[in-house]
Image (tube, rainbow, N blue to C red):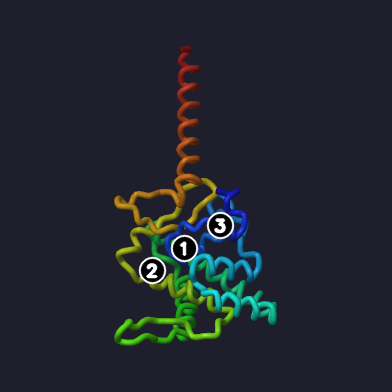
Amino acid sequence: MEQKNTSITTLQIVGGRACLDFANTVAARRNRWGPDLLAAYDDLIDWAERIGLLDRCEVGELRERSRQDPGAADAALASAKMLREAIYQTFSAVAAGLDPADGDLAAIAEKAAQARSRQRLTGNRRLGYGWSWAPPAELGDIAGRVAADATTLLTDPSRLGRIKECFGQNCGWLFLDVSRNGRRRWCSDADCGTPARVTRFRERMRSAAGARSSSGT
């Protein structure tokens, strides 16, 4: 998994929800932490475009804003990373059957409220109505939209029991298990599931060989 996730452009999108994939912008969380794939605000834009949180016009607006005010862009990135850790801690706890920390929930709720203040109801009777984001895009919009997605997921009882944390070595990624039996253990079978099975097989072979050696057979 490590070699396939060395940058935002090669990062695998396996979480099933924007908020979970946002937590997964740290390449590994189990046994070790990092590397952090959000090295610059442009990485945050690239990720949001890949995940579908921004349209092409918003991407252009945010790139221009970040160039005009790099200090504000850096601050927005730092704030987004703090939100990312609150999201990871929250859904890691949910995956383990525990209650998230109040502070993490409050951090997510605050960002989500800020984001929703920039939503507007649009549409018509013939085509239907829906929420859209008020232009122009602001530097904090990406984090806000991720937080809004996190609160939507947290308040969906049918989904909470499907949130999992990958058991792969040097992984710990979060994902929404939409498999029929709800028993998925890996963020990606190819990157974490297969290596884990190979490791277990080798351990069994070594154990069996050791047992035969001890018995003198």
Q: Element at badge 1?
A: helix
**Can you give x and y, in whole percent of width and height, for residue 84 in the image?**
53, 67
Residue sitting at x 62%, y 66%? 43
Q: Nearer the viewer, residue 92 or 138?
A: 138
Crowdedness of circle 2 by 10 Å Cα count: few (<14), some, many (20+)? many
First in sequence, mark 3 or 2: give its number. Answer: 3
Q: Is residue 188 above or below residue 160?
A: above
Marks 3/2: CA–CA distance: 22 Å
Identified at 55% across, 61% down, the residue is: 25
Q: Which mark is residue 189?
A: none
How many labels, in total?
3
Label 2 sits on what residue type? Leu
Q: Can you tell which quarter of the image residue 156 is in?
A: bottom left
**How crowded is the residue under tag 3: few (<14 C-alpha within 10 Å), some, or many (20+)?**
many
Question: Which numbered marker is on residue 153?
Answer: 2
- Percent x, y of residue 44: 59, 69
Disc 3 and disc 1: Cα gap in Å?
A: 13 Å
Residue 107 point in image, percent of width and height: 49, 75
**Image vertical order of residue 19 relative to residue 96, above or below:** below
Q: Nearer the viewer, residue 204 or 104?
A: 204
Question: Which residue corresponds to the image point at 46% horizontal and 66% vertical from the top-left?
Answer: 18
Which sits earlier in the primary sequence, circle 3 or circle 1? 3
Labelled pair 1, 2 in contact (Cβ < 8 Å): yes
Label ID, residue 20: 1
Q: Residue at x 55, y 82 (%)?
A: 137
Kind of element beneath mark 3: loop
| Secondary structure state at the residue bearing disc 2 | helix
In front of the other: 66 or 126: 126
Within-10-Å neighbours for mark 1: few <14, some 14–19, many 20+:
many
Dot placed on the residue nearer the N-terminal end, 1 or 2:
1
Q: The disc labelled 3 sits on which kind of residue?
A: Leu
Q: Which mark is residue 11?
A: 3
